[in-house]
Image (cartoon, grey):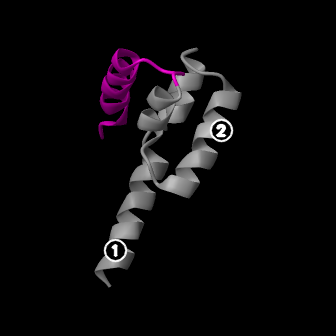
Amino acid sequence: MKRLGDRIKKEVFRRTKILLGRLLVDGGFISPVDLERALEEQKRTNEMLGEILIRKGVLHPGELQGVLAIQKTLSRPE
């Protein structure tokens, strides 16, 4: 039962927060193609999206930190 509850919580959080990939593409940090490739790899490896993009050299660690800070601010409940 706990696993189902955890999956539900993750899904609710995923749907209510602004997705990192959307922020990165909309902000011009990565291209839609970069995002698509990283998401495909994420499905295979379960690695975090930002880590994949940094490892591939598409995103700088400082850029990721900045965008994550923005995401956190935008995702706060009112």
What amino acid does circle 1 point to?
Gly
> Looking at the rendered structure, which numbered label has been put on residue 20?
none
Most foreground residue, 15 or 53? 53
> Looking at the rendered structure, which numbered label has been put on residue 5?
1
Q: Gap between marks 2 and 1, in whole Å? A: 30 Å
Q: Secondary structure at mark 1?
A: helix
Q: Is residue 15 above or below residue 6?
A: above
Which label lies toward us, 2 or 1?
2
Query: In which quadrant will I find the N terminus?
Result: bottom left
Image point (51%, 22%), residue name:
57
Residue 27 horizontal side relative to residue 73, left or right: right
Query: In which quadrant will I find the C terminus?
Result: top left
Q: Position of residue 7 (x, y in %)?
A: 40, 68
First to last magenta residue range: 57-78
Q: Residues within 10 Å of mark 1 (few under 14, many from 20)?
A: few
Q: Position of residue 13 (x, y in %)?
A: 39, 52
Q: Residue furthest bottom?
A: 1
Image point (61%, 33%), residue name:
35
Chief secondary structure of the magenta portion: helix
Does 61 appear in magenta?
yes
Quickly name the residue at label 2: 37
